[in-house]
Amino acid sequence: FYIDFETEINEFTSSVAYSGAEVANQDLIFTGVTTNQTTGNPVNYKQILRFDKWGNIVWKKNIGYGKFVKSAKDGSFYLYDNHPHNSGDIVVTRYNEYGDSIWTRIYGTTYYEEVTDLLVNKDDGFFITAYTTSETNNTYFLKCDSIGKIKSYGFLEGSGGFLTHTIDGMLAIVLKMPNNDICIKKTLIYGQEVWRQVYGKDINLFAKGIIE
């Protein structure tokens, strides 16, 4: 079905969808931005929309920030992005099934970070990876609980940092190494490395995701 990010009075003339995820009852959550071009200076409005499994809008709301969406088991969902007023930080907001904000957390270091991925854990906590300008290791890795409190963090060699769960309860992370090879690491849930494999060998590769 066609997704249109607009208000009920239909005064907006430009819209873009960013991200989507399936939540409880096979409903879908989408994020996007719609632009009011009826004034002299176009104004952007970020929105979240919930659709039922038939494509009917359940609700839609304007939001302050949040571009990418991931769902949790209890029907809630996370929005995450770089902070709109301090692009070197990461902002994560958890919403309930009605689109009401539960909490917002901001993460960052003394370096510049650009968020790459968020993976929801089995306990509805989550992992975050972000590109960082740290001179030695270029991926910032965090494990947080379901209220956003950091449980552990560290830095990984390579950039990118896309995440997936493995069947045996661990994590797999794909990274681009400084020599342009692709590295897949399997780690424990607190980030301790179990093994790694490197692919490429004189070929410039870039990974955009990983799934088991």
Image: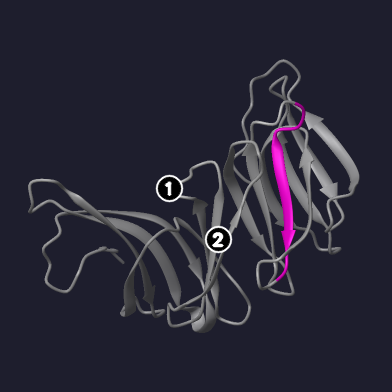
Main SS, magenta region, reads strand
Where does label 1 land, which residue?
85
**Within-10-Å neighbours for mark 2: few <14, some 14–19, many 20+:** many
**Amino acid at circle 2:** Val
* CB atoms of marks 1 and 2 within 8 Å: no
Q: Position of residue 14 (x, y in %)?
A: 19, 52
| Cα distance in 3D space between marks 1 and 2 | 14 Å
Over which residues does the magenta segment extend? 136-145
Can I make out residue 179 in this image?
yes
Q: Residue at x 63, y 78 (%)?
A: 73
Amino acid type of the residue tagged 1 in the rendering? His
Q: Quadrant of the C terminus?
A: bottom right
| Front one among 64 and 188 | 64
Residues 87 and 96: in front is 87
Rendered location of residue 168, percent (x, y): 86, 63
- Residue, disc 2: 92
Q: Which mark is residue 12?
A: none
What x and y, as percent, mark residue 138?
A: 70, 33
Q: Is residue 142 magenta?
A: yes
- Residue drawn at the location 70% of the way across and 43% of the way down: 140
Residue 93, above or below 175: below
185 lies left or right of 206? right
Seen from this angle, which residue lies furthest top? 202
> Is tag 1's residue or tag 2's residue first in the polypeptide sequence?
1
